[in-house]
Amino acid sequence: MKKSKILLSALVAVASVSIFGTANASASKLNDYIADNNIKPVGVTKSIWSGFPKNAYRKGTGKPEGVVVHETANPSSTIYNEISYMKANYNNAFVHTFVDATHVINIANTNYLSWGVGYPGNARFVQFEQVEVHSKSAFAKEIANAANYTASMLKQYGLKPNNASYDGKGTVWSHNAVSKYLSGSSHTDPVGYYSSNGKKYFGEAYTMAQFYTLVKDYYNGTTSSSSDSSSNTSDTSSNTSDTTDTAATALDKVNYYGADGNEYATLSSKYSSYRLYNHVKNANANMKKYSWSSASAYVGKKAYIDMRGVKAKSNTTWYRVRFSKSASAKKYWIFKDALKFLNVSYKDVSLTKKVKANSTYATHNHVYNSSYLSKVNGSTKDLQGQTLTINNEASKTTPDGSISTYYRAVVNGKNVWIYAGAFE
């Protein structure tokens, strides 16, 4: 009788660990916040760069066997800076996709391997990076985007969710799990980032177990996913939709970014594939289109730009241009691929530099004459003699092949871009 009671108690204890332990592991204030606030992940924007190598996954599979979750470990970077840096340094490492609170940007074809975790993981997994974000809402949105993207990759390649964190066997991997079970790397991301942001914004560490639960929810359709995730837009596919003459059934929402109006690009070799508009296409009921003859267009013609517009749903970029330096010249909106900007590459740095005593350069919120466009936000005249912390370096190649350098410095707690000539 005593033996039976002991056995029964043991079985109850095991059952409690199995049931309640699993539930507690997957319970999450962050996941609840996503559900309670009806946060929907964004669709994937395909911006495949042809410069990445195309190498097959390991022999016998021909396709990825899972997904690796990374994070950049760079608190001051943006998704576009990360992408630019990776394109410039892909020989060292690259991943397929970048994720933040408002974007999922696929830059390398997932049908070919990337190299972000070393051997043997590179030949087995789709890999994506999360850019560090800095608010409760942004972190929740980023996690939703990352989990939904992971689920979509599993579906795309016929894989079932299986958390590899516990035994090194599965389809959903952190970089930490790859380091632990497959070697080839010593990185532990995104564990630290998840934990610290979870504690900061939700009062508890966020874990890969909780992330995996969210992945399963999206995979099984128990959590609402992006309304356009099944018909993702891309820089390539959107070219067609942005040049057709079909009227939109609903106006597109556009986020606008102003500039000082004197920056420029030139018409690209494929400008004639697009049209000129009086507004961002399909963003205004009074939209009109114009032929290129009205602007006497030709490849290489200079276009002065005073505003950038980004469509909220498709994440496609448009620019407001004029073909004269005069601010009163007629203005048009054109799709980004109709323009060719100066090439700008970025890299993260950590250094200090002293502003020259007689420096009078303007400071900007972005590199001047880059595709981001920029606005003046100060002058080095007010910074003369000061030693500034530098966290990013940009190299801009001019048409004659010369390179000019800019530094992103921290001024009064904000990032500003300054021409290298302003420093000693």
Image (tube, helix red, strand yellow):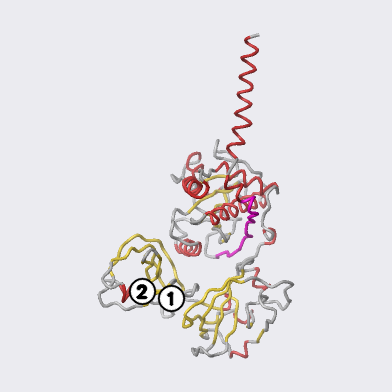
* Rendered location of residue 276, percent (x, y): 63, 83
Residue farthest to the top?
Answer: 1
* Rendered location of residue 4, percent (x, y): 65, 12
Q: Residue at label 2?
A: 419
Quarter of the image where one finds residue 235? bottom right
Q: Residues within 10 Å of mark 1 (few under 14, many from 20)?
A: many
Q: Which residues are magenta?
A: 34-49
* Rendered location of residue 116, percent (x, y): 49, 52
Residue 226 to residue 377: above or below = above
Circle 2/circle 1 CB separation < 8 Å: yes
Q: Secondary structure at mark 2?
A: strand
For the point 50% across and 73% down, which residue is it?
371
Q: Residue at label 1?
A: 368
Amino acid found under the numbered disc labelled 1: Tyr
* Rendered location of residue 128, percent (x, y): 54, 54
Image disc number at residue 337: none
For the stretch drawn in magenta, the main secondary structure is loop
**Sequence-first tag of 2 and 1:** 1
Q: Residue 107 or 59: which is nearer the viewer?
A: 107
Quarter of the image where one finds residue 46? bottom right
